[in-house]
Image (cartoon, grey):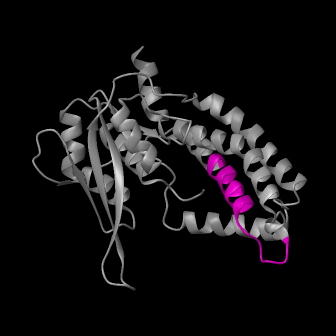
Amino acid sequence: MLDEHRSGRLTAWGNALIAGFAAPDDAAHHITGDDAVHRVVGLPGESGPVGLTLALGRLRALGATGLRLALPAPGHPLGLSGPPEFNARALEAGEAVVATGAALGLVPEVYEAGPEGDLHVEVVWHCLPVRDAPPADVPSLGEAERELAEALRDATEVLTRMDVAGSGPVAQAALEAYRARAERGRQVLAPGYPPRAVRVLELAQRVGALIAIAHEPGDGGGREHGAAVSASEIAARAQALRPVERTARRAQVAAYNAIVEERARRRH
């Protein structure tokens, strides 16, 4: 999908803050995005919920040298390193952030509040201990870029073979709609990230959008990207696209984690 994960925003702007490329209030503003408010609970030294600005400062004081994104899925603990309690929460949310150097992780819980017709979103980040170990299955930025180029070709081939018309005009219009919605007011990644990371993330999101289009129902007449309508065809499509989706998620994690990886290479 082109929609940005909240854990991605926290990772990117938290890293920009830690590296000195963003002010605390500016980072908190970008992390919150269109949500009403973000709070962090379970932070060591705090007895109750705190705001993002205080939380990011506390993580730095606790030794955090960078933030890493995790995008786990069933059978694929991408970006996680344990323990089981944190992994289970992250898997349920489908995303998490790991603070390197502080042995802490953050998992978002999203709530809708307010009267019908005037709902707003509130996010609570649960802070939990994590294992200080290499994250699972995260590729380098170079590996991710190479894999993505192949995945984009595979996705297009699968959509065409299954008569999903992934490169047809309706599918392309849907892709442009995803892109336009995501790009309104959005800055890809955050200050301090290498251009290659931005390029990889944009390509990963394009692949993700193609997958989303392939899974969407058509117009009821079997036209364009809803052409496969039987249960067996839908299952075959999902199975064929699963490796492509996995590659796109791995690339997103590599892009968001690039600034931390680059800093680690410089230290060694």
- Measured as percent of width and height from the top left, residue 165 is found at 85, 62
Which stretch is magenta? 203-223
Look at the image and say whether residue 219 sits in the magenta stretch.
yes
Instruction: Please identify the quadrant where the C terminus is shown.
Output: top left
Quarter of the image where one finds residue 259: top left
The reply to whether residue 254 is visible in this rendering is: yes
Front-most of 90 and 146? 90
Q: Is residue 235 left or right of residue 30?
A: right
Front-most of 31 and 137? 137
The residue that appears at 55% across and 28% down in the rendered structure is 137
Look at the image and say whether residue 263 sits in the magenta stretch.
no
Quarter of the image where one finds residue 45: top left
Chief secondary structure of the magenta portion = helix
The residue that appears at 55% across and 35% down in the rendered structure is 76
- Measured as percent of width and height from the top left, residue 34 is found at 39, 68
Q: Is residue 20 left or right of residue 266?
A: left
Judge whether 44 appears above or below 83 on screen: below
Residue at the top extreme, as displayed: 268
- Measured as percent of width and height from the top left, residue 25 is found at 25, 56
Judge whether 118 appears above or below 194 on screen: below
Front-most of 97 and 234? 234
Quarter of the image where one finds residue 213: bottom right
The residue that appears at 74% across and 46% down in the rendered structure is 239
Q: Is residue 129 left or right of residue 97?
A: left
- Measured as percent of width and height from the top left, residue 52 is found at 25, 53
Instruction: Please identify the quadrant where the N terminus is shown.
Output: bottom right
The residue that appears at 35% across and 29% down in the rendered structure is 83
Residue at the bottom extreme, as displayed: 117
The reply to whether residue 195 is visible in this rendering is: no
